[in-house]
Image (cartoon, grey):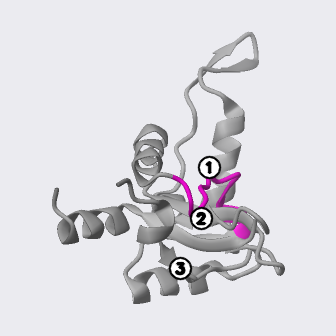
Amino acid sequence: MTKTVGEVMTPNPITVRPETPLREAIQLLAQHRISGLPVVDEENNLVGVISDTDLMWQESGVDTPPYIMLLDSIIYLQNPARYEKEIHKALGQTVGEVMSDGPISVTPDQNLREAAHLMNEKKVRRLPVLDPETQKLAGILTQGDIIRDMAQNPS
């Protein structure tokens, strides 16, 4: 019998809002020893995810993209829009300024194996779980949840 996401996920995860100060989100991550949080609006609709990866820009800063000068013109060798997004994350003061928007999500009735495959494919460590009827946040599935389930149910 195959397991579903709902059997393994963490229900009612800790969340933050886009207007939450970044310092508060960092404290929550450290206090609960987790690496990411779903970001929801006032109606509990998922709007993004903030993770330790998003926060690393705060500490590491941003390198100027490589460019060449040609006849008093600057030609960027990488996409300058990506650079602007990295600067925005490095200087952000609220969760909404730093979070990754458009997160990939799953539903509780989805096959756990498919969700794990999706995590590997998209290189994410967590998937918000949305109620299929209301589209509200119902839980979160993390790599840790899957590993704990594997440890409890060796096959």
Q: Which residues are magenta?
A: 96-110
Q: Is residue 68 left or right of residue 118?
A: right
- Which quadrant of the figure contains the N terminus? bottom left
What distance separates the C-alpha of mark 3 from that of mark 1? 32 Å
Q: Give the residue type that dot 1 points to.
A: Glu
User: Which label belongs to residue 86?
Assistant: 1
Tell me which amino acid carries mark 2: Val
Q: Residue 9: which numbered mark, if any? A: none
Residue 107 is left or right of residue 41, and the answer is left
Name the one closer to the observer, 45 or 56.
Answer: 45
Q: Is residue 56 visible?
A: no
Q: Is residue 49 above or below residue 81?
A: below
- The image shows residue 122 at horizontal and vertical percentages of 49, 41
Give the residue displayed 45% in from the left and 48% down from the top.
119
Does label 3 or label 1 sit earlier along the sequence?
Answer: 3
SS majority, magenta: loop
Look at the numbered disc 3 and give the secondary structure of its residue: strand
Within 10 Å of disc 2 (Cα), the crowding (few <14, some 14-19, many 20+) is many
Residue 120 in magenta? no
